[in-house]
Image (spheres, grey):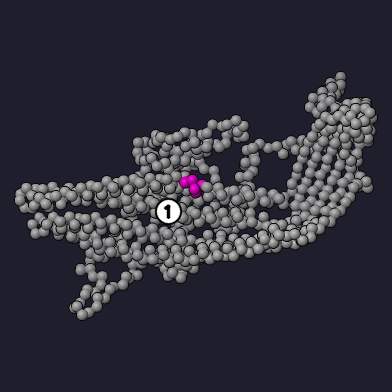
Amino acid sequence: MRMEMLQKRRHHFIRKYIGYDMYRLFSRKIPEKKRDRIKLYLAVFSLLILSFSQTSCPSASKYRIEADKAAANIIQAKQIQALGKAEAFSIERPSDTLRRRLLIEQNLPYFGKVSLGADTLEAIDGWPEENYPAANPSPDRMLLPEADQPLTISLIQALQIGARNNSEYQSRKEDVFRAALELDLERNEFRHTFAGKIESSYQSDSTKLDTLRGTKNSAEFAFDKTLRTGATFTTALAVDLVNLLTLGGASSLGIVADATISIPLLRGSGRNIVLEPLTQAERNVVYAIWELERFKKIFAVNIAKGYLEVLRQLSEVENAAQNYRNLITSTSRTRKMADAGRVSEIEVDQSLQNELRARNRWISAQESYKNQLDLLKGSIGLPPDAEIVLDTSELDRLIALTSKIMADITTEEPFDPGKRPGPPDTTTELAKPSDEDAGPLEIDSSLAIALALENRLDLRVTEGKVYDSQRKVVVAADALRAEVTLFGRAQIGESRSIATADLDNARLRSDKGIYSALLTVDLPFERTAERNAYRNSYIALEKSVREAQMVEDDIKLSVRRKLRDMYEARESRLIQAMAQLVAEKRVRSTALFFEAGRIPIRDVLEAQEALITAKNGFTSAVLNYRIAELEFQRDTGLLQIDERGLWQEYQPERGGPEDVREK
């Protein structure tokens, strides 16, 4: 009884999930010997279906994860090849970026969910992954703005924020990722490729006296392989199961094995020709990594320049405010002296005019500061209306480094930068600037150029593209040759249709196969397009050589210019320090002389104007020298930037970089 129930369940399952036609194969109406053979083929057929259903239909998220892993492995390997080291790399940014936190926590206006990030968007119809893009919290919330307080950021934090929030920075990283995916696709051309197809159809054939109706169930399994010599090899195994619904319900099993090989013998046959797309894709990933590293250097220096420019504007605001206060006091004092009859009304008006100009300068300085700060916010990927203030300790540190210059000047009495003019018949001798106070980066120009040519990654890219152009000449020359290809094919077995459903089951017999060989020859009589492409390849080579030479010359030019910028900024820093000391002394002297009634108010006003100009000039000179140092390291390729956006500066006396965080 139990065996009968199990048998019924088995037949019910087959009819429900496999079909009535296949169920008939298991009935006792078919001879035992024939039924066993059909069961064997059907078992193979079912295993093929099961294996494909389990392995070839993964979810969309699985495909994405596989692509991420493939790209990550490629990038890590290419980083070692291109940079000699591997560092963390990911295009997945935390969803709770500082930009989003500022929009929310500072209650800033924003357009909609798109302003907050892709993870906040509503999924549209047919969206493949329910939880992607996901809300990905940052592993370290570096900056947390306090409630109702502006966010204070340092220069180092600005570099980190820019690396995490700047859109162009993210796009450059995505360029590397896309190049890695393109390489993976090229590598796939030379991998083992499997394909499978399952078909089930109803057919009707009325060409004979009796109309035939039946079903045909087919499964095909194929394997392709392209060799690095250019040869391609393809095999396929197809299984057909045909069942007639008429003429007694005959059935038959067909099985066909097919193998094809194609071997190029002349054009397109060399490994270098066949692998050219793969070789170019491999090199493109290296180029993308080099270009990203070059961009990181440029980006970091631009952020530092923007940051220091804001500090300079802030210093001008403070100087303008102090000058405005001084002129208010001066005007008030002049007014009292005029009421006492000690000065004229004209001098009061002169003082008042300078006070008004000082107010206008103070307001203009504030607005310029706000504009520069907004530009800095945009460059590091933050909303322009976010409440941000900068840490002035960087400016204080740079000013403190130059305090020795001021101290040296004040100890020299009097300060004499050169010999004063002698009698009228002598020639004035001008003192040449000294290199005594030269910075550590003010090295010999020949050494600086040699370092730049060794470390500039964009020069490596242009050099690599010259080699790419050389390979393209070889490929273009190969296309001029005759095309000779050898084909071979072997096919054994037989397929089945409803017209042949009454035949015996097919068998794989090598002695009854179909074998063929074919040799095709395409003689190079017509190669006009290939001829022109070959000539153009030489033109492209010459162009790539010129571009490499131009990049080399630009590097030399920029390095020499930055050395001069440091030299000029250092001398300007000394001159502006002297000018500030003289201006301070002049302000003190004119104030005393004016109080004594020995000079007009105009001299006091001019002294105060000279003082604010000298202060602004000294601050600009200090910052200009620092910027020139950074730009010199950028243009020589000596400035190193890690994945967090932090830089490591070059220290010539140590022979290597120094971590910026140690300062």
Looking at the picture, how far across and down is residue 624, in whole percent? Answer: 35, 59
Q: Quadrant of the N terminus?
A: top right
Q: Is residue 324 magenta?
A: no
Q: Which residues are magenta?
A: 166-170
The answer to whether residue 268 is above or below residue 172 is below
Residue 165 visible? The answer is yes
Q: Amino acid at mark 1?
A: Asn
Q: Is residue 15 above or below residue 292?
A: above
Q: Quadrant of residue 474?
A: bottom right
433 relative position to 190: left or right: left
Query: Residue 385, position in %: x, y?
Result: 38, 40
Q: Residue at x 47, y 48 (%)?
A: 163
Height in image: 644 above or below 45? below
Q: How many marks?
A: 1
Q: Residue at x 21, y 55 (%)?
A: 609
**What residue is disc 1 on?**
302
- Pointer 1 local density, CA inside 10 Å: few below 14, some 14–19, many at least 20: some
Residue farthest to the bottom?
425
Q: To which quarter of the image does residue 499 belong?
A: top right
Q: Position of residue 578 (x, y in %)?
A: 25, 63
Residue drawn at point x = 48 percent, y = 38 percent: 96
Magenta stretch secondary structure, dominant:
helix
Query: Residue 458 in the image: x percent, y percent?
Result: 53, 59
* Looking at the image, residue 650 lies above or below residue 196: below
The reply to whether residue 653 is visible in this rendering is no
Residue for point 65% across, 49% down:
184
| Mark 1: secondary structure | helix
